[in-house]
Amino acid sequence: MAHEPQTPLAYRAPAQQPDDDGGPRRDAHDEKSGRKRRLEYPPAPEPLPVPVMDNHTHLDFRDGLVRVDVHQAMDAAEAVGVTGAVQVGCDVASARFTIAAIEAEPRLLGAVALHPNDAARLTERGEFEDAFAQIAELARHPRVRAVGETGLDYFRTQDEAGHAAQQESFRRHIRLARELGTALQIHDRDAHDDVVRILLEEAADGGLPPHVVFHCFSGGPDLARTCAEHGWHMSFAGPVTFKANDELREALRIAPAELLLVETDAPFLTPHPHRGRPNAPYLIPLTLRGMAETRGDDVAALARAVSENTARVYGAF
Ligand SMILES: [Zn+2]
Ligand SMILES: [Zn+2]
């Protein structure tokens, strides 16, 4: 039977827009062009032949014209073969949302941390230590399986003091994940060299957490070779399907299958052909199919490999 593309029911816009609940939300304008984005959720893609997990999503970030709860989000995802997701809390409030979500929804695991851009702001205000202590406490929840997203963001934070604060925060999060024995999810934006340098320094000084994941991997073949050499995972998101990103696809082609993961980073980074519209875990099949095409892999075989990797990194749901 032919697949009929339709937006999942819970994601269809109602006649009236709901009141804003004041929580975090994606900007209604495109980051690059500044143009107003199209805010309707895209139709659901054809289901995957083998189920996979979305290993990085932000279900607390609102986008689009509807409010979708975590159960509806996972129902829509499961209908296309996305049977689980790692919900990422990237400040204290978002980490608390994450704990509530993983306790309410068995198809979710959690990751918590202070995002590098927040780490810089908190340090400036003298509030980092208190916030980090709260994250470290929440990270002990048995279904929090990663510390993240942490790392370096030199795109949004451009001052030297901010970079220093991010580096210190990154080291603290690496040590926390090592102590807890969880995976580490790294946010690396325009900062490949310093991310790799700090990982190697921490590896030499006490060791790294059991699994290292570059979330929304954004490097070229050089970074992919470095990751392969050290056994670090590369998690690909929507940008791997964007026309201009040949370097990223070159990295994907040379990455070993046993280190590949897939994610949405929803509601951001919506894959082609729906770039700019809201993103959600049910759109993973578009990215996974794009990855298979780039690598010349069979879709089912790639999905199976990614699923095995996800289970190894985050454990059982
Ligand atoms: Zn990120
Ligand atoms: Zn993220």
Image (spheres, rainbow, N blue to C red):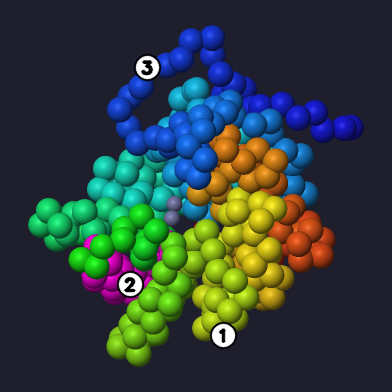
Q: Residues within 10 Å of mark 2 (few under 14, many from 20)?
A: many
User: Residue 204 location, x and y as percent?
Assistant: 35, 90
Quadrant where the N terminus sits is: top right
Residues in magenta, as a range: 162-188
Label 2 near ligand 1 (CB < 8 Å): no
Which residue is found at the position 58% from the left and 34% from the top? 277
Residue that badge 2 annotates: 174
Circles 1 and 3: CB atoms closer than 8 Å: no
Residue at mark 1 to residue at mark 3: CA–CA distance:
49 Å
Instruction: Kindly identify which residue carries mark 3.
Output: 19
Q: Nearer the viewer, residue 175 or 108?
A: 175
- Residue 308 locus on image (x, y percent): 63, 65
User: x, y (%) of residue 275?
Assistant: 62, 41
Residue that lies at the very extreme toward the top in this rendered image: 15
Q: Quadrant of residue 78?
A: top right
Q: Is residue 156 left or right of residue 52?
A: left
Q: Label 3 crowding class (10 Å Cα cut-off): few <14, some 14-19, many 20+?
A: few
From where the camera sits, is residue 188 visible? yes
Residue 235 sits in quarter: bottom right
- Which residue lies most toward the bottom here? 204
Q: Which residue is mark 1?
A: 229
**Is the CB of mark 3 within 8 Å of ligand 2?**
no
In primary-sequence order, the first of circles 1 and 3 is 3
